[in-house]
Image: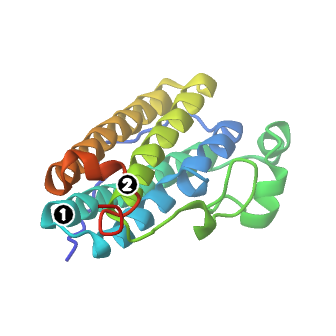
Amino acid sequence: MFVYEKKLQYPIRIKNTNPKLAAAIISQYGGPDGELGASLRYLSQRYSMPYPELKGLLTDIGTEELGHLEMVGTIVHQLTRNLTEQQIKDAGFEAYFVDHTTGVFPQFASGYPWSAATMQVTGDTIADLTEDLAAEQKARVTYDNILRLSDDPDVTDAIRFLRAREIVHFQRFGEGLRLVKDRLGEKNVYYMNPSFDQ
C-alpha cells in the first residue's frame, strides 16, 4: 500500500514564467522517456519479478517516479501560471494553449500525446531490468538536454535534483541485475532464457 506524503520530494519555487521552457520540460512528464512511463513500467514489472528484493526495488523506484511526475508537473505549472496572451504568442505556446490552456498534459515536447507504447513489460527478469537500466539513462539524457536549454536557476536546481535521482535508479537497477546474475550463475545471465539455454 502506498502512503501519500503531501509535499514534494524536493522543493520547487519558480519565480518567473517561461512557457517555451515548459514546452520542453513537459517531455519529462509524458514524453518517451518521462516519469509517467517510468512509474507505470516499474510498477507493472514488479509482478513478474521472481525475487522479493526485486519486487521491492521496482515498487520503491516506481513510487518515487510518481513523486517525480508530480515535481515535473509542478515545474510546468509554475512556468505557465498567469501567462499573458502576448507571452503565449511570443513563446510559440499557442498550439499547446489551444488544446490544454495551461493544464499539465502528458505529452512529448514535440506535442505527441503520451502512450503506453513507449514502455515495455516482458515478464522476463533480465530483459526487464536491462530495459530499466536503459530507461534511466534515457531519462538522464533528457534532463541533460533540459539543463542545456534552461537559463532559470530555479528550474535548473530542481532539474539537477531529478537528474541525480535517475543516476541513483540506474545504480540500483545495476545492483538488481547483479543479484540475478548471482542467483542464475554467471554464464546463464547472457542467455535469453536460462530454462531453455542450459
- What sort of colour scheme is used for the picture? rainbow
The C terminus appears in which quarter of the rendering? Answer: bottom left
Residue depicted at 15% across the width and 49% down the height = 182
19 or 27: nearer the viewer: 27
Residue on which disc 1 sits:
56
Q: Position of residue 22 (x, y in %)?
A: 63, 43
Against 97, residue 196 (above or below) is below
Q: CA distance from mark 1 to mark 2?
A: 25 Å
The N terminus appears in which quarter of the rendering? Answer: bottom left
Asked if residue 151 can be seen in this view, the reply is no
The image quadrant that residue 92 belongs to is top right
Q: Position of residue 21 (x, y in %)?
A: 65, 37
Q: Would residue 183 appear left or right of 127 to someone viewing this image?
A: left
Residue type, label 1:
Gly
Q: Position of residue 27 (x, y in %)?
A: 61, 49
Q: Give the SS element for disc 1.
A: helix
Q: Would residue 128 appear left or right of 78 to someone viewing this image?
A: left
- Label 2: how many residues lie within 10 Å, few (<14), some (14-19) or many (20+)? few
The image quadrant that residue 159 belongs to is top left
Against 73, residue 49 (above or below) is below
138 or 174: nearer the viewer: 174
Dot placed on the residue nearer the N-terminal end, 1 or 2: 1
Residue on which disc 2 sits:
191
The image quadrant that residue 148 belongs to is top right
